[in-house]
């Protein structure tokens, strides 16, 4: 009798730790990569604002049709995290379609690559 009680208790306890499975044997529990739960880390680079007038527009999106969120002063350093493709801008015969992304003062914005130094290339920052 003790053996039957022991076996029954053992099977019941094992059943409590089993994960539910479907008919094909797959578990209902999904494995998630960090990106699936909104966790990702991106390196930022300090970039110097160059060219333009005394201030360079940082826009709500990667193009001149987006509203100006703020203006960055030429000659100052700012942190940028990635490059987003957008409207192509041609200055002095050179075309640049990359817009450097940053969050400044809680606001996301983009500066065309013409106005940042060589620390903010696509190769260094990566795509957004």
Image (cartoon, helix red, strand yellow):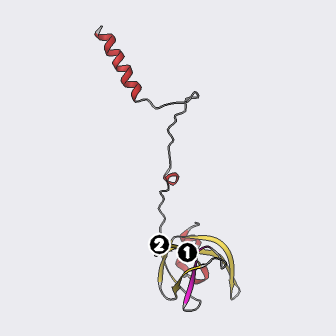
Q: Main secondary structure of the magenta part?
A: strand
- Extent of the magenta region: 55-61
Q: Is residue 46 magenta?
A: no
Whole-percent x, y for residue 35 in the image: 51, 54
Queried whether the magenta region covers residue 59, the answer comes back as yes
User: Which quarter of the image is occupied by the N terminus?
Assistant: top left
From the viewer's side, name the closer residue of 107 and 62: 107
Give the residue at mark 1. Answer: 109
Residue 99, position as x, y percentages in the image = 60, 75
Residue 55, placed above or below residue 39: below
Q: Quadrant of the C terminus?
A: bottom right
Residue ID for mark 2: 106
Labels 2 and 1 touching (C-beta < 8 A):
no
- Residue 115 percent location from the top left of the image: 58, 83
The quarter of the picture where residue 69 lies is bottom right
Q: Residue at x 61, y 82 (%)?
A: 114
For label 1, the SS is strand
How packed mark 2 is, by other alpha carbons closer than 10 Å (few <14, some 14-19, many 20 or more), is few
Relative height, residue 16 to residue 126 (above, below): above
Viewer-proximal residue among 118 and 14: 14
Nearer the camera: disc 2 or disc 1:
2
Quarter of the image for residue 10 reads top left
Q: Identify the element where label 2 is drawn.
A: loop
Q: Nearer the viewer, residue 97 or 30?
A: 30
Q: Looking at this view, name the residue that lies furthest to the top.
A: 1
Q: At 58% from the left edge and 89% from the top edge, which residue is drawn?
A: 51
104 sits to left or right of 6: right
Task: Locate residue 78 relative to residue 5 in the image: left or right.
Answer: right
Q: Nearer the viewer, residue 54 or 121?
A: 54
The numbered disc on residue 21 is none
């Amino acid at each position: 009798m003790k053996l039957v009680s022991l076996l029954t208790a053992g099977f019941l306890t094992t059943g409590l730790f089993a994960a539910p499975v479907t008919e094909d044997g797959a578990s209902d529990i999904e494995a998630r990569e960090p990106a699936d739960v909104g966790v990702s880390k991106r390196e930022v680079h300090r970039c110097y604002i160059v060219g333009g007038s005394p201030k360079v527009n940082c826009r709500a999106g990667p193009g001149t049709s987006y509203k100006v969120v703020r203006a960055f002063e030429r000659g100052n350093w700012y942190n940028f995290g990635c490059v987003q493709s957008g409207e192509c801008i041609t200055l002095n015969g050179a075309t640049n379609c990359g817009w450097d992304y940053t969050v400044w003062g809680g606001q996301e914005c983009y500066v065309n690559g013409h106005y940042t130094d060589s620390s903010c290339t696509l190769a260094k920052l990566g795509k957004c």
